[in-house]
Image (cartoon, grey):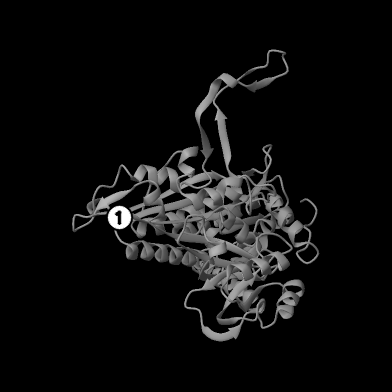
Amino acid sequence: MSKELSTREENYSEWYNELVVKADLAEHSAVKGCMVIKPYGYAIWEKMQQALDKMFKDTGHVNAYFPLFIPKSFFSKEASHVQGFAKECAVVTHYRLKNAEDGSGIIVDETAKLDEELIIRPTSETIIWNTYRGWVQSYRDLPILINQWANVVRWEMRTRLFLRTTEFLWQEGHTAHATSEEAVSETEQMLEVYAHFAEKWMAIPVIKGIKTANERFAGAVETYCIEALMQDGKALQAGTSHFLGQNFAKAFDVKFANKEGKQDFVWASSWGVSTRLMGALVMSHSDDKGLVLPPKLAPFQVVIVPIYKGEEQLKQISEVVLKMKKAMEAKGISVKYDDRDTQRPGWKFAEYELKGVPVRIAIGGRDLENGTVEVARRDTMEKETLQQADIENKIEHLLEQIQDNLFHKAMAMREAKTYKADTYDEFKRILEETPGFVMAHWDGTPETEQKIKEETKATIRCVPLNNKQEAGVCIYSGKASTQRVVFAKAY
């Protein structure tokens, strides 16, 4: 195996960067700011996709696909939307290349300039709402409940694998409704879906809340979010759901005849999560030895490594292993049997430790005699000897324990890194010395929020849903406040 990772304590950022590459999740590509998601990393993303896709379909949504290219004129139709994305847009201006006459290489053919420039989608509201105009005539055509799995491009100057790349993968839901109440209900429902996925699949506790006006999605009336806390005390926005009101319907003239026969504009929501969740998964649970994966998202939940002398003993071990493997797979447990003869068992142990496989089973000659196996769990690094009989039920129970343990461990970490601050000096000291979620009073003005951000780099992550109301004074302005909000430095 390659050299050990940097430790989280000495350099959390370097530890993360090394781990993503060494654990075979992703690597930098030849295109600056873009990544190659490797098979092991993509297998985790596929697990995320499968779980989320089922949740979307269970709540009545269907999948569709819309173009990668968006006419530039579409962006100008919703003013705040174009303002929010203008600096991140990649623009296609020509459609052909040619050889330079002086032989210096390939150049753009200036005679092949597009009549209208095209934006490579940073998000799809504009192209989708232009399409919906042709789909909606009356209330009978509503609701439209569509999700798209796609790639998007947002031109980033400073990139980081999974957390912030120029191109990334995501899903984006875009729904159309006859009433404001339906659209708000949809927005809130999808926030619950994301929170459920984060906590039950990713084993990451999240705070559900509403973004401030400064942090709201460009073009939204209200943005709901789930916020997670990473081990270094920085926040990570793990999903957003937006109530768009009638903004995009008005911009693209999407009207319908309601039950009274009157014309009205359609109400909308949009919601999405991206491969940024991969970064959240790595940073929430992993340790200085490598990845720690929750069983529900691990590419394989169990790896079995034989320890043998000679081909005959390997054959005997394999007979036992294949029966165990079949019994576990019948329980829905994914199992890999690594009987490669190109690497020693110790090397394999280190590899699967680095890759975060939840359970490792080792079986050798003595185990054959005793009817036992050695079982190691990745989350606690504990080992125990178990009887081979009924092993599938024991492993099923163990995987449930690991999933629960990772969630409770992450929750304990978050609670330990959640603080209250009543003065600005206390607020700044916490951010500097023991970063985490800081619950503090805010006067509700965008100006104060911006000043705090400029001076400390901390943002209001959200105003928690069903937030406790309490009288206080803003840590910055000293003005009256009715509640504490969640501040943190963030990815």
At label 1, which amino acid type do we have?
Pro
Identified at 69% across, 37% down, the residue is: 30
Note whether residue 94 is visible.
yes
Horizontally, is 210 left or right of 106 in the view? left
Identified at 57% across, 81% down, the residue is: 481
Assign the C terminus to one quadrant of the image: bottom right
Horizontally, is 173 left or right of 212 in the view? left
- Of residue 14 and residue 333, the one placed in the foreground of this image is 14
- Of residue 482 and residue 144, the one placed in the foreground of this image is 482
- Of residue 16 and residue 90, the one placed in the foreground of this image is 90
Residue 385 % position (x, y) = 63, 70
Horizontally, is 404 left or right of 156 in the view? left
Q: Residue furthest left?
A: 260
Q: Which residue is mark 1?
A: 143
Identified at 51% across, 42% down, the residue is: 121
Residue 346 % position (x, y) = 74, 56
- Of residue 191 and residue 108, the one placed in the foreground of this image is 108
Residue 39 % position (x, y) = 59, 45
Asked if 259 appears above or below 396 in the picture, the reply is above
Residue 58 % position (x, y) = 35, 59
